Image: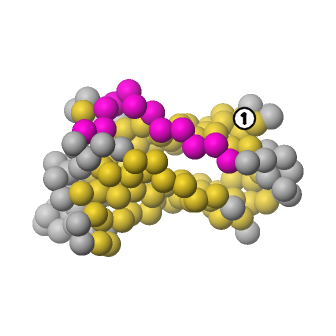
Amino acid sequence: IYHQYHPTPISGWEKNDTLLFITAPAKQRAVVQRDVELRMATNYPYQQLSLIVEQTTLPSTIRRRDTINCQLINPEGKIQGHGINLYQYHFHLPDISINDADSLHFRIRHNMKRDVLPGIADIGIRLTAY
């Protein structure tokens, strides 16, 4: 029901640069599978990436906050994603229920010690109703 990416500068995604995703109002009640997707370049300096995902459901103003610790490179140094120059990853968040006319607003930022984080090219949200 929704699939969108926002680019981040590969040279450095700033810690205070929050990405915003807004869905259109739902046409019916549904259970929604939520996935955060990302694309990583080979210059990413860490094995993991910590993301904070804040979601607000409108008009009810229900808020939810999830922290995802994304394993991008295994302890042996092997990239876990799929790709050649950019590596694609999918990370599942808990499923949620939405009502007719609900709109979801997501805010995503990184939660790493480094203020400017190189090597992340895109962050996306995929929502699938079932």
Q: Residue, x 30% and y 49% (percent of image)?
A: 120
In terms of secondary structure, where does tag 1 sit? strand
Q: Residue, x 30% and y 65% (percent of image)?
A: 87
Q: Name which residue type carries label 1.
A: Ile
Q: Which residue is mark 1?
A: 62
Specify whether residue 113 is in view.
no
47 on left or right of 14: left
Q: Residue, x 86% and y 57% (percent of image)?
A: 28
Q: Where in the figure is residue 112, as x and y percent of width and height? A: 29, 36
Q: Is residue 129 magenta?
A: no
Determine which quarter of the picture holds residue 8: top left
Q: Is residue 19 magenta?
A: yes
Foreground residue among 57 and 1: 1
Specify whether residue 78 is in view.
yes
> Which contiguous range is marked in magenta?
12-23
Q: Where in the figure is residue 128, as x and y percent of width and height? A: 65, 64
Q: Residues within 10 Å of mark 1 (few under 14, many from 20)?
A: few
Q: Where in the figure is residue 71, as x and y percent of width and height? A: 31, 57
| Furthest residue toward left | 76
Q: Taking 75 as reference, is 48 above or below it?
A: above
Q: How is the rendered protein coloured?
A: secondary structure
Q: Taking 86 as reference, is 6 above or below it?
A: above
Foreground residue among 107 and 69: 107
16 on left or right of 95: left
Q: Residue, x 72% and y 35% (percent of image)?
A: 62
Foreground residue among 106 and 74: 106
Q: Where in the figure is residue 50, as x and y percent of width and height? A: 35, 44
Count of picture labels: 1
Q: Give the quadrant of the C terminus.
A: bottom right
